[in-house]
Amino acid sequence: MDQDSVEALGRLLEEARRIFVFTGAGVSTGSNIPDFRGPKGVYKERPPVYFQEFVASERARSEYWAFKAEGYRAFRDAEPNPAHHALVTLEKLGKLNLVATQNVDGLHQRAGTSSDLLVELHGTNLAVECIECRRRETPDRCMQEFEATAQPPRCPACDGWMKPAVVMFGQALDPSRLGKAQSCSRSADLVLALGSSLVVTPAADLPLAGVRAGAKYVIINQGATPHDRLATLRIDGDVVDYLATAVGRL
Ligand SMILES: [Zn+2]
């Protein structure tokens, strides 16, 4: 780690009172969650199923459930890492405006980030929901049913199709989640973009709302991002190491 960067990060965190945090896959790779879109991402080998195909085709539904069932145990057993815990520390220090995450692993919630300070932009793998009546439950029943029968599970209330409560390709982000994140970004005095390549819009535009309103901007990511020239502090490195070290010194 570059010590000047750790110290600069520490100073910005020390001064900040209202931090908007935007997290991506790089925050979760330290918890052994695969990065789906990165250079070695799962999607490079296995094209995603679109929501419209899921609705229209039995084959697509089976393919999607098989993909989700494969990854389910890894998600269920993953543990939060020091980056997730560092964000809980910022909350306890009263410095946190919001955590808006692109991740669907539920690890911010599991680490202890309060639900009113957390927006899961792309949903969560820790729940399944009916595409018709939106009934939600934990995934166990559906996963067991799919593994036993290889049939995509149906809703016990309305017989609609169940699916993991994540935003699929071809589905829009929830406007109320997006709106809350935008407003918390705009009212922030510091924006942290952590472990995201900042290319998947509209989510990746969220930090810019705060930056345009005058917030300082820290980007920690391995590899370049399209926002780099806007950053007050740009760290190319492991977000878990940098964030946990700087927050640990507060
Ligand atoms: Zn239903």
Image (cartoon, rainbow, N blue to C red):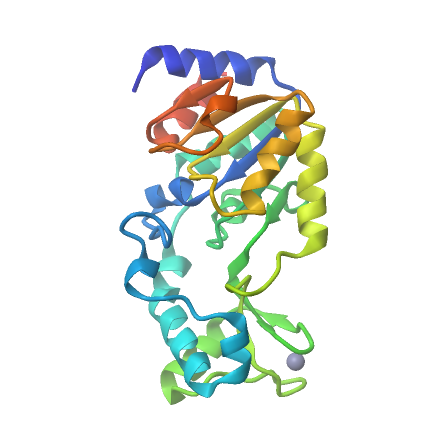
Please determine whether, in this image, residue 8 is positioned above or below residue 96: above
- Measured as percent of width and height from the top left, residue 162 is found at 55, 77
> Looking at the image, which residue is at 43% across and 87% down?
151
> Which quadrant: the N terminus?
top left
Image quadrant in which you'd find residue 82: top left
- Is residue 94 among the parts visible in the rendering? no
- Is residue 36 among the parts visible in the rendering? yes
Please determine whether, in this image, residue 129 is positioned above or below residue 215: below
Please determine whether, in this image, residue 185 is positioned above or below residue 105: above
Q: Is residue 234 left or right of residue 180?
A: left
> Looking at the image, which residue is at 54% across and 37% down?
22
- Measured as percent of width and height from the top left, residue 203 is found at 57, 45
Give the camera-side residue of 44 and 36. Answer: 44
Image quadrant in which you'd find residue 135: bottom right
Specify the quarter for ligand 1.
Answer: bottom right
- Measured as percent of width and height from the top left, residue 127 is found at 54, 65
The mark total stands at 0
Q: Is residue 249 left or right of residue 132?
A: left
- Measured as percent of width and height from the top left, residue 201 is found at 54, 47
Please determine whether, in this image, residue 24 is positioned above or below residue 223: below
> Looking at the image, which residue is at 66% across and 41% down?
181
> Looking at the image, which residue is at 42% across and 74% down?
64
